[in-house]
Amino acid sequence: MPTSTFFNLSQAKQQRLLDAAHQEFSRVSLHEASISKIVLAAGIPRGSFYQYFTDKEDLYYCYSDYLRQHTKNSLLDSLKATEGDLFAAFRRYFTTLTAEFINGPNAAFYKNMFLNMTYKNSRKVALSTQMKHAHHGHSDFYANVDFSRLKISTAHELGMLMHILMSALFQTLGSYYLRQQHDEPVTVAQLDQEFEQTLGWLEHGVAIN
Amino acid sequence: MPTSTFFNLSQAKQQRLLDAAHQEFSRVSLHEASISKIVLAAGIPRGSFYQYFTDKEDLYYCYSDYLRQHTKNSLLDSLKATEGDLFAAFRRYFTTLTAEFINGPNAAFYKNMFLNMTYKNSRKVALSTQMKHAHHGHSDFYANVDFSRLKISTAHELGMLMHILMSALFQTLGSYYLRQQHDEPVTVAQLDQEFEQTLGWLEHGVAIN
DNA sequence: TTCTATAATGACAAAATGTCACATTAACGA
DNA sequence: TCGTTAATGTGACATTTTGTCATTATAGAA
């Protein structure tokens, strides 16, 4: 977490840092990013950087938080819009996400984020704040799920299902970026179809009987 | 890929390198690994390292290949043992994998591998060689799947399903290591149950009716 | 023995990171 | 207005790491 010193900075200066973060983390992954380049772009002395952040990671997660807070996509909103239908909510959420991630102004950042996302940091860059709380029976998210449509009941099961659904979503987006990087063109329609296929399997099962 | 020079080395010297790789990549993740420490441990001059490998990654994937080749676990074997039942094969495979990954001599290496696995490198460290070829209709793996049990037919669909199943498996193992690192004890039995839950959902669907 | 291609070696330049002693500013009471 | 104190700004620096390269050693063929 950034120090209080950072948050006490003028909006303009904070923004310079965030802009520099955007630039560098869009250029390369977190690991390849250079603090030297960031302080240069932000126009601040090297020492100051360490007064605000402990390291690259600190700035990275700060920037990803900033992005999340300035994005209106929320799984909870989708859930409300679909009257508690979890699968419908994920379909809706997926559509808004792809639009944002593939054509939005932060596409390059998200691409690096996805291609380099690990289990270790997946918690920290959780796209939806809901994820973190879904497994709590008293969360806002849990309260909005229509369980009569599902073969599950406990909050723990919901948490697990959410993880599977999220990793299916990540899988689809990740494979998009991967193929894009290997110059194998993929259309958004194909992506939709692949995610739909996966959701269908989870909804109705793959086994015959 | 390592140079031919590396493979021309005496077995003993190759092994020194692989042992050093094992040591360093068990200590820390690929990104945190230090070439300096590796050459020190292997007792070779720095320059030689670059004569054999282009960089850390090169050695890493070389070592992970080496591990795979010296491991008898194979999804294909499981598939044959279960007479083409894909889900049963994954259950079987999962059991052998957890034993190997959690208690085997390379547990520390696998832990770092899993916690830091990304979409970008997931292809290169594919645990099973079969994964890479599953989507080819003429692959050995494809030929052994009993499709009469499944609602799928094309090789492309099989490839997608394999990815989902693999990412469910990774998800389960990844969450194990993550919780372990946060000192939340997890038993192998719990892990089995979680994977079983997920497989059940994929087999029979989560939606009611 | 001499020649030649292949491999070994470690000193080195370049780049990056995190720290620290010192300079600057702001805040506030006398 | 001034002076004291706490907070913040600054960049030079030590350290570490990486990849390169000129030079040396080695082994097999002629």
Image: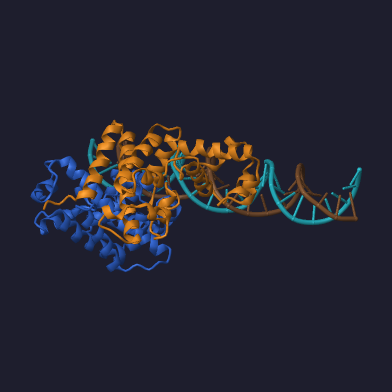
Chain colours: A orange, B blue, C brown, D cyan
Q: Report which quarter residue A151 is drawn in.
A: bottom left
Residue found at x 62% / y 43%: A46
Left or right of A38: which side holds B54?
Answer: left
Which x, y percent locates residue B196? 23, 61
Q: Report which quarter residue B135 is drawn in.
A: top left
Which x, y percent locates residue B165? 23, 51
Left or right of A49: which side holds A151?
Answer: left
Left or right of B90: which side holds A147?
Answer: right
Pick whichever, A61 or A99, lies toward us: A99
Residue found at x 37% / y 37%: A96
Residue found at x 19% / y 48%: B130
Which x, y percent locates residue B6? 30, 48
Pick whichever, A152 or D23, lies toward us: A152
Residue found at x 55% / y 37%: A20
Pick whichever, A156 or A88, lies toward us: A88
Q: How many marks?
A: 0
Q: Report which quarter residue B139 is drawn in.
A: top left
User: Is residue B40 in view from this perspective?
Assistant: yes
User: Is residue B39 in view from this perspective?
Assistant: no
Which x, y percent locates residue B9? 29, 51
Left or right of A23: which side holds B187?
Answer: left
